[in-house]
Amino acid sequence: YYIIIKIFTIFVSLKLFILKLIYKNKLIILYNLYIKIKNKTTNAFCNSTLPFQLLLDAPITPKKINDIELCDIVKGNKVDLTQNNLAILDGLDSNLYAFSYYSSEQDAANNSNSLSMNYSIPPNLKTITIWTRITNVLNRSCFTIMSFAIVVNPLPMVDVLPNVVECSSYILPVITNGDYYTGTNGTGTLLHAGDLIKKSGTYYIFSGPDNKTCTKQSSFIVTLIAEYSIKLNYCGVFI
C-alpha cells in the first residue's frame, strides 16, 4: 500500500520550474511540482515521481471608485449596483470576472446573503457601505473584496405656500427658498416676487439643484373668482 506523504519543490536532482505568463493583463505563475510516493509498510520512498502543475492566479487590484451620491426622495431610491463595474476593473477584461454584492465584509468573504443588483433604499438620510466580491471566473477560489459607499443626501429647502382664492389677480409674495415657475421642475416661465398673476392655475416653487444635484419642489393653486362662470340655461331645476 502506498500513500502520498510529501510534496516538495526540490528533491535530489529535481528542479523547480517557474513560468511567469502575462495573460489578459494579469500575472499567472505556473509551478511544476513533484510528488514522491512512500510505502506505508517499509517506510521507503519509491524511485518514481509524479509531476503536477500548480497554477497561481494573482487576485486583481480593484480601482477605488467614488461614492454613489443620491438624493433623498419620498418613495426611496433604487440603485444599479453594477454601474461601476467597468471602472473598478480599470481596463481588465470584464468577461473574466464576476461581481456580487453584500451588506457586510463577512458575507462577502463567505459568499453568502448576496444583495440584488437592483438595490432598494428606503427614504431618510443615510450612508450605506456595500461590499463587492470580484471573482475570477476561471478560478473561483481567486477573489478580491472591496467596498464603496452609497450616500443619501438631503433635499434643499423650498418654501410652501397655501392655495389662494382672489377676485381678479394675485401678487406673488417674497419667498426665501426657491423660484416661481409656471411648469414643473423648473420649466415653463420663470416668475418673480411682485409679479401679478391674472390666470387661475397651478404654480410651482422650485429649489436647486444644490451641490449634490438635489432638487425639491412645492406647488400651490391660484383660483380667480373673475374667471368663474356658470351655465345660464337649465331644464326644470338649478342647483
Image (spheres, rainbow, N blue to C red):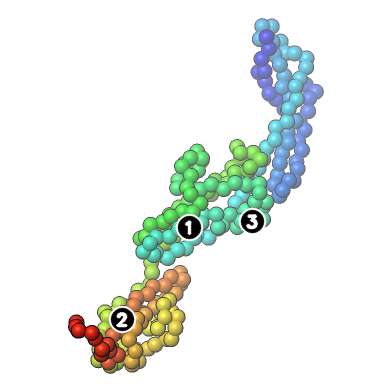
The quadrant where residue 221 appears:
bottom left
User: Can residue 176 be seen by looking at this rendering?
Assistant: no
Q: Residue furthest front?
A: 236
Which residue is painted at 37% across and 88% down in the image?
192
Point out which mark residue 79 bears.
Answer: 1
Where residue 83 sits in the image (x, y, percent)? 55, 58
Q: CA distance from mark 2 to mark 3?
A: 52 Å
* Quadrant of residue 233 within the rendered picture: bottom left
The residue under the point 43% across, 86% down is 189
Q: Which residue is mark 2?
A: 221
86 lies left or right of 235: right
User: Which quarter shows the N terminus?
Assistant: top right
Disc 2 element: strand
Relative to 151, is 213 above or below? below
Q: Residue furthest top?
A: 41
Give how far across and how far down residue 224 sits, in percent. 28, 88
Asked if the residue at tag 2 contacts the one at tag 1, i.e. Cβ–Cβ closer than 8 Å, the answer is no
Residue 170 x %, y %: 29, 90
Amino acid, disc 1: Val
Residue density around tag 3, few if under 14, some if 14–19, many if 20 or more, within 10 Å: some
Residue 90, label in figure: 3
Q: Earlier in the sequence, mark 1 or mark 2?
A: 1
Instruction: Judge whether 55 appears above or below 204 on screen.
Output: above
Amino acid under disc 3: Asp
How crowded is the residue under tag 2: few (<14 C-alpha within 10 Å), some, or many (20+)? some
